[in-house]
Image (cartoon, rainbow, N blue to C red):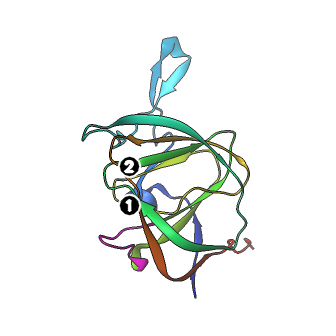
Amino acid sequence: MRTLALQPLDVDAFAPYGFVIAPGPGGGVSINDGTSRRFELPDPDVAGDGARAALAVFRAQAVALPFVVRTLERHRLGGQGFVPLGGVPFVVVVALGDARPDGETMRAFRLDGRCGVHFARGVWHHPLLALADGDFVVLERRGEAVDCELASVAHTLVVERPAPAH
C-alpha cells in the first residue's frame, strides 16, 4: 500500500498538470467603470477537432478521507476544468504518463473552495472528490467522439488526511 500525501494547492506545483483558476499575482485591470477587476487566465484547451466548449454543473456528494484511489481518467482531446460554487473544498489527484498513470508523478492537492483547476489535455486525474456536498461548474469538451479513458491504479493508493499543524 502506498500513501499519497495531501498537500495544499500551489500554483507552481500544479503547473505540470494544468492551471489554477484564480486571480494571479498583481492587481489585474480595472474594468466596468471601476466596479470590477479583470485577471487574465490561460485559455482552456477544450475546443477543436469538431468539438466545442461545454458548461455543466456537477452536484457532488462528499467523500471521506482517507480515500482509496482505484481508477484515474484522462481526456486526450481536450482539458477539463472544475470550479466550486459556494466554497466547496475538494481534492484533486493527478498524474502524468503516456499509456498509464506514472506513479512517480502522482500528486494529491487540497483546494479550499476559493479557486478551481483546469486539467491539461491528457493529464490523468481522479473524478471529482468533494470534501463536502456541493455544486461545481465544469468546463469541458463536447464532441461526437467520447473523450474519457480510464486506467486502474496498479497498487493500493490511499489519500490521507493531512497531519494537524503544530
How packed is label 2: few (under 14 Cα within 10 Å), some, or many (20 or more)?
A: many
State the residue at coordinates (37%, 41%): 44
Which residue position holds label 2? Answer: 79
Who is closer to the viewer here, 132 or 23?
A: 132
Labels 2 and 1: the sequence-earlier one: 2
Direction top: furthest residue: 33
Residue 108 covered by magenta stretch: no
How packed is label 1: few (under 14 Cα within 10 Å), some, or many (20 or more)?
A: many
The region drawn magenta spans 94-103
Q: How many labels does the image show?
A: 2
Image quarter for residue 36? top right
Image vertical order of residue 90 relative to residue 156, above or below: above
Mark 1 residue element: loop
Quadrant into which the C terminus falls: bottom right
The kind of residue on which mark 1 rests is: Val
Left or right of 147 in this view: 137: right
State the residue at coordinates (70%, 69%): 65
State the residue at coordinates (49%, 35%): 55
User: Which x, y percent locates residue 47?
Assistant: 31, 38
Image quarter for residue 48? top left
Disc 2 to disc 1, how far (Cα)? Answer: 8 Å
The kind of residue on which mark 2 rests is: Gly
Left or right of 99 in this view: 125: right
Give the numbered dot on residue 8: none
User: Which x, y percent locates residue 91?
Assistant: 60, 60
Residue 98 covered by magenta stretch: yes
Which residue position holds label 1? Answer: 123
